[in-house]
Image (tube, rainbow, N blue to C red):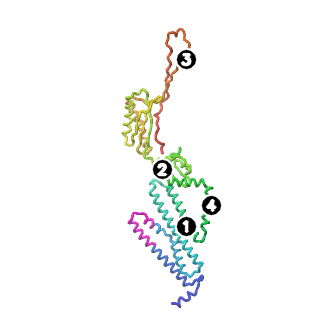
Amino acid sequence: MNALTEPFRELLIGGISVQNWALGIAVALIAYLVMSLALRYAVSRMKAIAERTDNHVDDTLVEVLGDTNRVFLVLTAVLIGVGMLDLGGRWGTRVSQLWFLTLALQFGLWFNKAIGIALRRYVSRHTSAGMTQVSASSTLMSWALRTVLWVIVLLAILSNLGVNITAFVASLGVGGIAIALAVQNILGDLFASLSIAVDKPFEVGDAIGVGSISGTVQHIGLKTTRLRSTSGEEIVISNTDLLKQVVKNYRRMQERRIAFNFGLSYDTTPEQIEAVQRSVRQLIEAREALRLDRVHFQSFGESALTFEVVYFVTTPNYGLYMDEQQRLNLEMMRAFARLGVQFAFPSRTVYIAPTAARPTPDDRGRRSAEPEVVTRSVPPAAVAGRGAEAAP
């Protein structure tokens, strides 16, 4: 046997005998086969365990290990085989650096996969069924966590290769300050986007109002937020400008508070006023979608006896509110007609004093002229009201 292998010991390739090369290749092949079988067995066993449990930790481990990169398995097997070769001291250092590089990249890919799985589950728990885009919080967390992960991996690899990362990080800090001053507006929008993601004043799919603008949130980006207005066009607002204003989130509205006024003419009697109050209360209380707050004879106006009515619509549906308000207005008109009362319209009474003149012989003994009374009216006005918020 020694006689057969003796020629291969003397034959050198790259300063290493053929026998040593054969040993290294055989060990690499065996290592790859063992690692592949062990990985497949571990994944199948963990999958069986995960099917019997309710937690998501084992499910995550199954997905992470199942996503192991085969290229790194091959590279690991090759490094194991290279370890069997008779290499010099310099090559031994290079091989150890390759070991660290391989393991660092593989662990980076595993953690990157775990971040993706965690964010996917976060989105599935916090995203409504009607949303078509990923929420801003998941986008920002994905970007931040993956950036931190790969920066750590890169710094670890550079440190293993002998790079002075302390000076490198310091130089990055100085450069970062210069870049931050140059792009401070962009960074302002970025931090505003982060604030939206953390505080969540609104999310994709919410109907919001900002100043005189209202619409549905279509996308929350790192710099801008896009709304689809009620008239159909797309509105793009920078995140910084958006958070400087008062934002009304209509989607989170649970019910609508409605307050409106109407006026009756001054020839209405106290008994009719009490009947009007009872009638309005009954009209509102008869509807399941409405909840009465109060009905009051509020004040003596310039040209009307003013009533104030406050009620709640028990759902935020704007169309339902308009239907109910229209029905209430029509029923009030019919009820007031039966009671014999009239809605008041603005009017003004003007007293015109007579012009002072010297009395004539014919006017002696007559009474002083009475002032002339002229009543002028303006066209009837619609029932005044303070309604709900504008339609989202």
Label 4 secondary element: helix
* Res. 174 mark: 4
Q: Earlier in the sequence, mark 1 or mark 3?
A: 1
Q: Amino acid at mark 4?
A: Val
- Residue under label 2: 206
Which structural element holds mark 3? loop
Q: State the separation of the CA atoms marked 1 and 3.
A: 100 Å
- Reading the chain from its start, which is encountered first: label 2 or label 3? 2
In the image, which is nearer the foreground, mark 4 or mark 2? 4
Mark 2 or 1 closer to N-term?
1
User: Which labelled disc corresponds to residue 355?
Assistant: 3
Query: Disc 3 residue type?
Result: Thr
**Main secondary structure along the magenta-highlighted residues:** helix
Q: Is residue 275 magenta?
A: no
Pointer 4 with pointer 2, Cβ within 8 A:
no
Q: Position of residue 187 (x, y in %)?
A: 58, 55
> Along the polypeptide, which appears first: circle 4 or circle 1?
1
Task: Identify the disc placed on residue 153.
Answer: 1
Secondary structure beneath dot 2 equals: loop
